[in-house]
Amino acid sequence: MALRHATFTDENLRLPEDAFSFEGFQRWVESEDFPDTGRIDYLAGDVEIDMSPEDLYTHGLVKGAIHAALQQLIIGRLGDVYTDKARISSRFAGLSVEPDVVVVLFDTLKSGRVRYVPAAVQQPDRFSGIEGAVDLVVEVVSDGSKNKDLKRLPPLYAKTGIPEFWLADARGGKVSFQIHTLEEGKYVPVEADAEGWTPSPRLGLSFRLLRLQSLISTPYFVLENRPA
């Protein structure tokens, strides 16, 4: 049996004994003991916990720009767009995570490939998470999540059947923005053109992520789009 482990950034946090099974982790998620802050992911038997604050300029603003652009394109017409605390899960892949951005298209929801998990309060239109292969997930790389974002999550997202995986990294001098599409069970990077535009097969548009400077020389980000 593989050794299961947890990665902590908060020594005061304690895990339930059964948190290393998918069912046990999901019970913890739905309990009152589950933390309200931080990001806690279940990755095929391992639990990764990051309670550190996100970097404002290399993570928070990047995530916000991507979410804002996708929300403007999709929300209310094509589907739903989520950021922060939107948990997706797949029993088949052994995955329970909160991506930086999640897209669920209405057609996918109607097909039954995805379902919203009713909240514990059991009231109409109250949901606590999403099960199944959502249409698109976005991860913004941070210093603490580099190994998870680049190595651990992609094969699990692929096993879940998520058609598109976006990866952004603004920590260096050049902003990296990649779109990966699912082919034969693995993610394949979509090639960008000379101007940095990358097509999204799922959304039928091309995108590029720009880092610009504000009036006081602080960075901000814009996710541009145009017809593919």
Image: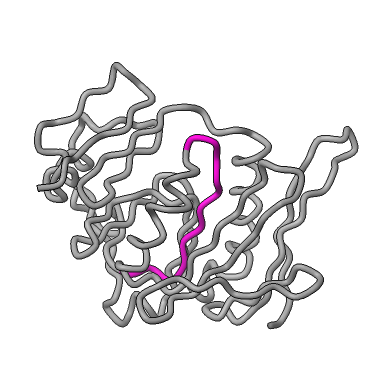
The percent position of residue 88, horizontal first and vertical second, equals 33, 56
Residue 205, above or below 31:
below
In the image, the segment drawn in magenta is 133-144
| Closer-to-camera residue (65/76) | 65
Residue 129, above or below 115:
above
| Closer-to-camera residue (62/9) | 9
Quadrant in the picture for the C terminus:
bottom right
Q: Residue at x 10, y 32 (%)?
A: 17
Q: Which residue is most to the right? A: 215
The percent position of residue 42, horizontal first and vertical second, equals 27, 46
Judge from the rendering whether residue 174 lies leftward or rightward of residue 135; answer left or right.
Answer: right
Would you identify the image quadrant in which residue 5 lies? top left
The percent position of residue 163, horizontal first and vertical second, equals 43, 74
Judge from the rendering whether residue 120 lies leftward or rightward of residue 217; answer left or right.
Answer: left
Total marks drawn? Answer: 0
Residue 55, above or below 156:
above
Render colour scheme: one colour
Q: Residue at x 75, y 50 (%)?
A: 174
The percent position of residue 176, horizontal first and vertical second, equals 67, 55
Residue 141, above or below 160:
above
Does the segment drawn in magenta span residue 216?
no
Q: Residue at x 60, y 82 (%)?
A: 204
Judge from the rendering whether residue 58 lies leftward or rightward of residue 219; answer left or right.
Answer: left
Judge from the rendering whether residue 122 lies leftward or rightward of residue 53; answer left or right.
Answer: left
Q: Residue at x 23, y 41 (%)?
A: 29
